[in-house]
Image (tube, rainbow, N blue to C red):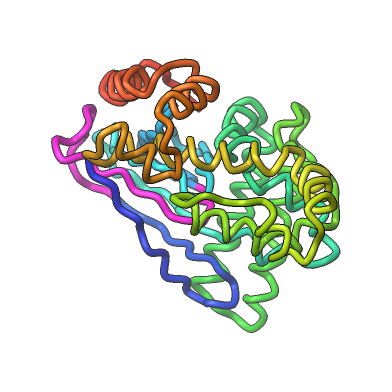
């Protein structure tokens, strides 16, 4: 299995987005290709289908998108797609880095979209069940596409407004409280810390040293992180490490021991215990389950 980090080239660097309409006239692809390549990118991805039937696959779910359907793929979430109907598949893809859209007046809501607790993919059930919500967000995506293609005077303002409308619509339409986040104004202060964790997962991450990076005492940093992120610093690191291990299991030829070492865990018993805590199974069982789900589409979510 191959993996590809797709570079997203923004149409306007200040807007941090790329939106494009795609048309696929190829043959129907009901089964995974032999040289299946998963891809990912830091940007959140929205997909809106205008005609045809589009299959989308993440590590845990398979979606069938019909005309008018909408879905979201979280930041850095592995996925791939295929064409499922004889007619042309026409769909719009919006890639967006959400973080720059959270100015100081909105930063208190950033934890809801930071995907610390769960990926934005969980919102797809909400889109499937709520037609009005789905149509409202799809309308904003269409307007963003029109603005970026037309580039009339003020298109930057219009596009920025529509991105924020999407965020507001998801937040207010989340009647299940799927977008969990602690309303706190310290998320911006933690951003360099979160980036530091991402860059040093393969190393020992000492909270004493990290607290110094944040210019806080050990005790204050520990409480501040828990209050802001709704989980402890250690819990956050463990989630990130297991998430990285899941990707490596599915996309590399590394052994389980090598994977554990690459995410900074040298004690294999500890790695197995932690992996099972998050996934309910061993790494080998996880790999078998994911391989089966990919080939058979056991978990099928149809919008």
Q: Nearer the viewer, residue 271 or 74?
A: 271
Q: Is residue 223 above or below residue 273?
A: below
The quadrant of the image that shows the N terminus is top left
In the picture shown, does residue 294 fall above or below 217? above
286 and 88: which is toward the camera: 286
- Let me know if residue 25 is in the magenta part: yes
Q: Residue at x 42, y 70 (%)?
A: 9
Q: Say which quarter of the image contains residue 112.
A: top right
Which residue is painted at 47% across and 52% down in the image?
Answer: 203
Q: Position of residue 266 (x, y in %)?
A: 41, 37
The total of numbered circles placed on residues is: 0
User: Would you say 162 lies left or right of 47 here?
Assistant: right
In the depicted structure, whether residue 236 falls above or below residue 273: below
Query: Does residue 49 lie above or below 275 as drawn?
Result: below
Q: Which residues are magenta?
A: 24-46
- The residue positioned 49% from the left and 50% from the top of the image is 201
Q: Residue furthest bottom?
A: 153
Horizontal relation, residue 156 to residue 71: left or right: right
- In which quadrant of the rendered view does residue 66 lie? top left
Horizontal relation, residue 11 to residue 97: left or right = left
Q: Nearer the viewer, residue 41 or 192?
A: 192
Q: Position of residue 213 (x, y in %)?
A: 69, 65
| Secondary structure mainly formed by the magenta segment | loop
Examine the rendering and report whether any part of residue 297 can be seen. no
Q: Is residue 130 visible?
A: yes
Q: Position of residue 185 (x, y in %)?
A: 85, 57
As for residue 179 lying within the magenta part, the answer is: no
Q: What's the residue at 30%, 52% (across, down)?
A: 4
Q: Position of residue 267 (x, y in %)?
A: 43, 32
């Amino acid at each position: 299995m191959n993996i590809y980090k797709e570079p997203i080239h923004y149409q306007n660097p200040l807007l941090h987005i790329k939106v494009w309409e795609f048309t696929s006239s190829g043959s129907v692809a009901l089964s995974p290709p032999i040289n299946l390549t998963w891809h990912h990118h830091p940007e959140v991805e929205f997909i809106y289908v205008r005609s045809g039937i589009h299959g989308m696959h993440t590590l845990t779910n398979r979606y069938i998108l019909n005309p008018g359907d909408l879905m979201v793929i979280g930041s850095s979430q592995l996925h791939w797609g295929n064409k499922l109907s004889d007619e042309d598949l026409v769909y719009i893809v919006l890639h967006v880095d959400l973080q720059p859209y959270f100015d100081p007046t909105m930063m208190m809501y950033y934890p809801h979209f930071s995907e610390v607790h769960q990926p934005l993919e969980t919102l797809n059930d909400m889109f499937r069940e709520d037609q009005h919500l789905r149509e409202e967000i799809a309308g904003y995506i269409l307007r963003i596409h029109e603005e970026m293609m037309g580039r009339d005077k003020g298109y930057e303002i219009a596009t920025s407004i529509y991105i924020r409308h999407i965020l507001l619509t998801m937040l207010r339409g989340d009647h299940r409280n799927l977008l969990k986040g602690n309303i706190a104004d310290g998320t911006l202060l933690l951003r360099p810390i979160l980036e530091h964790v991402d860059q040093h997962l393969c190393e020992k991450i000492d909270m004493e040293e990290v607290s110094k990076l944040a210019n806080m005492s050990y005790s204050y940093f520990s409480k501040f992180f828990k209050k802001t992120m709704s989980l402890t610093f250690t819990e956050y690191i463990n989630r990130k490490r297991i998430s990285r291990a899941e990707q490596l299991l599915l996309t590399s030829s590394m052994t389980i021991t090598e994977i554990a070492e690459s995410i900074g865990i040298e004690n294999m018993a500890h790695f197995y215990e932690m992996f099972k805590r998050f996934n309910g199974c061993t790494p080998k069982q996880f790999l078998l389950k994911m391989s089966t789900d990919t080939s058979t589409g056991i978990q099928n979510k149809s919008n």
